[in-house]
Amino acid sequence: MIGYRAPSFSINEDILKIIEQAGYAYDSSYNSFGLNERYGRIDIANGNRKGIAVQLSDDFWELPMSNLQIGSTILPLAGGGYFRLFPFPVFRAGIQAILERDNAYLFYLHPWEVDPEQPRVREASRSFRFRHYVNLKRTHSKLASLLRRFSSCEFVTCAEYLRRNTSISRPTH
């Protein structure tokens, strides 16, 4: 493993230092969408950019979530619950805009998000149940549509992206 992503994007500068000291080559925990109180904050403004990767130190990179800024509003479009929640045409148009802007797009999806038959935790709060279970039955077909729509794009892992676009010196397998 050469990369890390904090649960619920709960990253901060102290945790980032620990991740780097632990020997990881990159972190992918920064989500610029600010309306979720669980998301952490780090400063990537002064980092050296190589595509979507941001160099934070000599041998450590950040791969921030792909979001779309419309005016002063950040639209979270990297995947997960946002992929399940937003209508596919909105998500598709957002990805296209991000690709035109950055020539790359970072997407994530949890394996459980393509399992509509997973057990339901009835004791969980209503807001948790909504976030976790909304549109699970549609995720697989939306993912298939996304792969068809962007079939001319090359899909690579974060490690492979870094290997191709930066001076990363660590093995990526």
Image: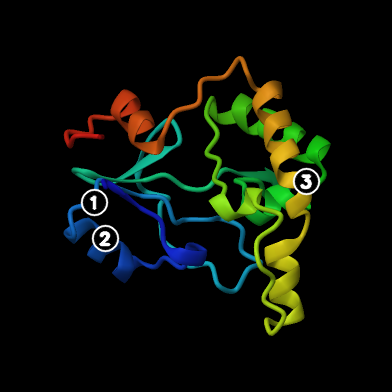
Q: Which residue is mark 1?
A: 24
CB contact under 8 Å: marks 1 and 3: no
Q: Residue at x 60, y 27 (%)?
A: 99
Coloured how?
Answer: rainbow
Left or right: residue 102 versus residue 51 is: right
- Residues packed near mark 3 inside 10 Å, few (<14), some (14 to 19) or many (20 plus): some
Q: Residue at x 26, y 46 (%)?
A: 2
Q: Quadrant of residue 148?
A: top right
Callout 1: SS: loop
View extreme (top): residue = 152
Give the spatial CA distance, label 2 vs label 1: 6 Å
Marking on residue 131: none
Q: Amino acid at mark 2?
A: Ile
Q: Position of residue 75 (x, y in %)?
A: 70, 50
Q: Which residue is mark 3?
A: 138
Left or right: residue 29 versus residue 114 is: left
Left or right: residue 152 versus residue 82 is: left
Placement of 93 over or under 10, stated as above or below: above
CB contact under 8 Å: marks 2 and 1: yes
Q: Position of residue 85 (x, y in %)?
A: 77, 53
Q: Residue at x 57, y 47 (%)?
A: 109
Placement of 101 over or under 110, stated as above or below: above
Q: Residue at x 72, y 80 (%)?
A: 122
Q: Nearer the viewer, residue 9 or 59?
A: 9
Q: Quadrant of residue 129?
A: bottom right
Q: Position of residue 43 (x, y in %)?
A: 41, 58
Give the spatial CA distance, label 1 vs label 3: 35 Å
Q: Nearer the viewer, residue 93 or 42?
A: 93
Q: Nearer the viewer, mark 1 or mark 3?
A: 3
Q: Which residue is mark 2?
A: 19
